[in-house]
Amino acid sequence: MVNQNKSIEVDFDAVVVGAGFGGLYAVHKLRNELGLTVRAYDNGSDVGGTWYWNRYPGALSDTESFVYRYSFDKELLQDGKWKHNYLTQPEILSYLSDVADRFDLRRSFQFNSKVTKAYFNDSANVWEVTTDKGETVTAKYLVTGLGLLSATNIPNFKGRETFKGEQYHTARWPKSGVDLKGKRVGVIGTGSTGVQVIIAIAPEVEHLTVFQRTPQYSVPIGLKQQSDAEKSEIKENYGEIWKQVKSSAVAFGFEESKVSAVEVSKEEQERVFEEAWNKGGGFRFMFGTFNDIATNSEANEAACNFIRKKIQEIVKDPETARKLTPTGYYAKRPLCDNGYYNTFNRDNVSLVDVKENPIVEITPKGVRTTDGEYELDVLIYATGFDAVDGNYTKIDIRGRGGVTMRDKWADGPTGYLGMTNTDFPNLFMILGPNGPFTNLPPSIETQVEWISDTVKYMVEEGISTIEPTVDAENDWVETCRTIADMTLFPKADSWIFGANIPGKKNAVYFYMAGLGSYREALKEAGYKGFVFDRAMANVE
Ligand code: FAD
Ligand code: NAP
């Protein structure tokens, strides 16, 4: 299957791409723990990934502070600092920067360097990786932490370039900030990002026009300060906390409910929803209240009705309330917010329903919809991401025999165990397609640990390549499809199935059985679905 032994000298044992949670931990494991030589790249000017790019006002985690972090190092955990039960973007960026310092990770990185090509050379079994700076290096292993919500999506509105004001995508927010005081600002998009930015800038701007295509179900986040005593208690219990997180489904640090909504009375449903509404948290509302909100239409409708009723109660103008009230399933990544619906009670905020009156074009003055022109000084695109495979298909990745990733994934991206791909030997994807859908740092750690264990095994056993079999990959993708179809998520259009990008193939991007099951699946699979090759044991 592989060409004959041909000893070549590689520049590095591994190339790692990405300086977010995934890439940073990969460098630590491969370089600091396994002693491999590593070259890492990121197109940003420093570490942080998501939190380097998403500097928009209001950017906040919706995973609670105590579990939106690495768990691998006890001292790092004990030194953890945070103010509230959720983390602001600057706090997370500073945390990742401290991690980079603590483990001396920056010296492996070339920043401001975008990887443009990665070719697998099958006669030598090495990856040849090229950047936009014109550098090409070779490595035995290619580890990609390109981010699943990283490639920005700006819809191709007619006339975008003609706008005379300032326009920004939220994930390319300038480091120096944007002065919005006294300006007429438009926001397109009301996903998790739109909701956060809308709340944050409404008090500052002269007028805010929100262009909403699909209304969202959002519940309060429950943001509050955490006292030193609360933090100490968490730190004392981290052993148990991570055990629970890693064996749970969504890995958000709370116990998922075992009670079915359809088996309790309406009064009990109401009581449980009200309690969760008051406590806060999107995942907690969807998964901590009842065990069938995401899987049973009747249970889902009960949750929908509860949130719809809240919107009607909060929003004073009946027409605005109508537009803000969703009608479909509550089956996207659940949102939470710090006063979203209430923001529409402000005099300086107006809502334009662009499903009823679609955007026709961006004009020099602002946004023209079918019902008129909205004049703006600043236009903000909170229009999300070409999720999961978006950054992969931007790179010219070629595997065995020159097969391109773009062709291989033409019908939707695939990843055996969410990390590997047939025809792409020794490519390890962190948060690649068909990986877990959870609070992400513990899933990232799970995958990076599997990758580094596998690399260690390959080095010790003198194995030159690893690649999943076609059958193993197909079976895994089928498993992911079966699990996804047991949920209501495929019934709602979102990035989770690639539905947010016009023309993108609807595919199953995630393993939706949860982190605990995923970790079990990894254990069970072992290396069963892989082909190893020992021909190149003499690569230096
Ligand atoms: P990223 O942090 O996205 O890092 C990928 C890096 O790779 C980026 O810096 C990118 O520029 C770089 N890169 C990509 N392609 C190339 C290339 N060709 N060459 C060089 N460099 C490249 N998840 C949660 O679990 N909880 C949350 O509360 C949460 N909040 C979020 C809030 C926002 C605003 C967003 C956008 C996402 C959020 N997420 C959240 C998801 C978040 O992306 C993950 O939690 C996590 O940060 C992903 O880390 P990563 O290292 O896999 O990828
Ligand atoms: P998103 O959920 O994909 O939302 C994009 C928004 O833009 C949607 O309202 C969408 O409308 C709208 N949109 C896209 N194209 C449009 C068009 N042509 N015309 C009009 N509207 C258009 O993206 P996101 O809000 O950036 O969130 C993505 C993910 O990032 C989240 O699910 C979450 O995982 C993560 N995130 C988390 C947080 C957090 O709370 N910690 C914050 C931000 C992001 P439609 O719904 O009609 O498509």
Image: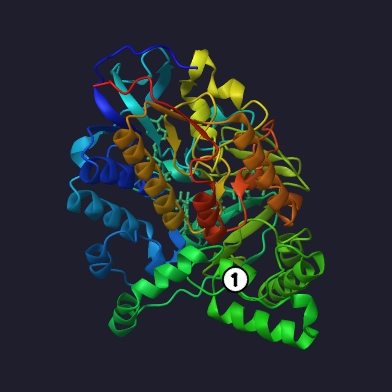
How was the colour assigned to the protein in this rendering?
Answer: rainbow
Which residue appears at 73% of the width and 86% of the height? Answer: 268
Residue 473 or residue 108, whichever sits in front: 473
- The quadrant holding residue 339 is bottom right
- The quadrant holding residue 422 is top right
Which residue appears at 32% of the width and 78% of the height? Answer: 231
The answer to whether the residue bearing label 1 lies less than 8 angstroms from the nearest atom of ligand 2 is: no
Q: Is residue 301 above or below residue 539?
A: below
Measured from the top left, where is residue 272 in percent x and y? 66, 83
Q: Amino acid at mark 1?
A: Asn
Q: Is residue 55 above or below residue 287?
A: above
- The residue pinned by badge 1 equals 342
Residue 216 or residue 291, whichever sits in front: 291
**Callout 1 environment at 10 Å: few (<14), some (14 to 19), or many (20+)?**
some
Which residue appears at 61% of the width and 61% of the height? Answer: 334
Residue 139 can be seen in this image? yes
The kind of secondary structure element at disc 1 is: helix
Residue 59 can be seen in this image? no
Measured from the top left, where is residue 227 in percent x and y? 32, 82
Measured from the top left, where is residue 59 in percent x and y? 43, 57
Measured from the top left, where is residue 187 in percent x and y? 56, 49
Q: Is residue 439 above or below residue 257?
A: above
* Residue 377 left/right relative to 178: right
Q: Is residue 477 above or below residue 229?
A: above
Image quadrant where one finds the C terminus: top left
Residue 413 or residue 96, whichever sits in front: 413
What is the total number of numbered labels drawn onto the structure image?
1
